[in-house]
Image (cartoon, rainbow, N blue to C red):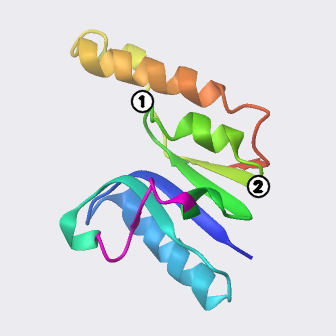
Amino acid sequence: MIIHQWVPAAHRGDAIGDSARKVRDLLREMGHASDVFALTIDDDLRNDVRSFSDPAASRGDITIFHFALPSPMTEPFARLTGRKVVQYHNITPAAFFAPYDAGLFRLAALGRRELATLAGRVELAL
């Protein structure tokens, strides 16, 4: 079985990317083909994480999408024909940012709206 993961960015020391790579390693140990795909990849991870532009990104039997921000990955993920899992990494409610940072307010509000577009389109949300 092919089980891929999508992360918006792969940065060393980032919880989302680091955990995705650990899960990938575990899946491989269990005998599954598995890769992590990202839009942005730090130079030192280029041999460990694949580019989201690689056509193989959409060829998983199961794809796990790590959702933490609005992303150009969301709609392609929703259109996948294989099984889909969303791992939600929390978006702070936009109202928290309103008095402090209009940009973060908009980003958080957009993220929550974008997440809602996946309702009913995935097999599992974590």
Q: Which residue is mark 2?
A: 82
Q: Which residue is mark 1?
A: 92
Query: In the image, 25: left or right of 51?
Result: right
Nearest to viewer (mark 1 / mark 2): 2
Q: Is residue 45 visible?
A: yes
Question: Are there few (<14), some (14-19), or many (20+) residues within 10 Å of tag 2?
Answer: some
The front one of 41 and 53 is 53
- Residue appearing at x 62%, y 80% in the figure: 27
What is the spatial separation of the Cα atoms under label 1 and label 2, in whole angstroms? 30 Å
Q: Is residue 75 above or below residue 15?
A: above
Asked if labels 2 and 1 touch by Cβ distance under 8 angstroms, the answer is: no
Query: In the image, 32: left or right of 57?
Result: right
| Three-letter amino acid code of the residue under disc 1 | Thr
Q: Which one is earlier in the sequence, the residue at label 1 or at label 2?
A: 2
Q: Is residue 5 above or below residue 110?
A: below
- Per the rendered image, the range of residues in magenta is 46-55
Question: Are there few (<14), some (14-19), or many (20+) residues within 10 Å of tag 1?
Answer: some
- Residue appearing at x 57%, y 82% in the figure: 26
- Residue appearing at x 22%, y 16% in the figure: 101
- Residue 43 lies, in percent from the top left, at 20, 66
Q: Is residue 96 visible?
A: no
For residue 118, what is the image quadrant? Answer: top right
Q: Is residue 66 above or below residue 50?
A: above
Majority secondary structure in the magenta region: loop
For residue 5, what is the image quadrant? Answer: bottom right
Q: Is residue 11 above or below residue 109?
A: below
- Residue 93 lies, in percent from the top left, at 45, 23
- Residue 123 lies, in percent from the top left, at 79, 48
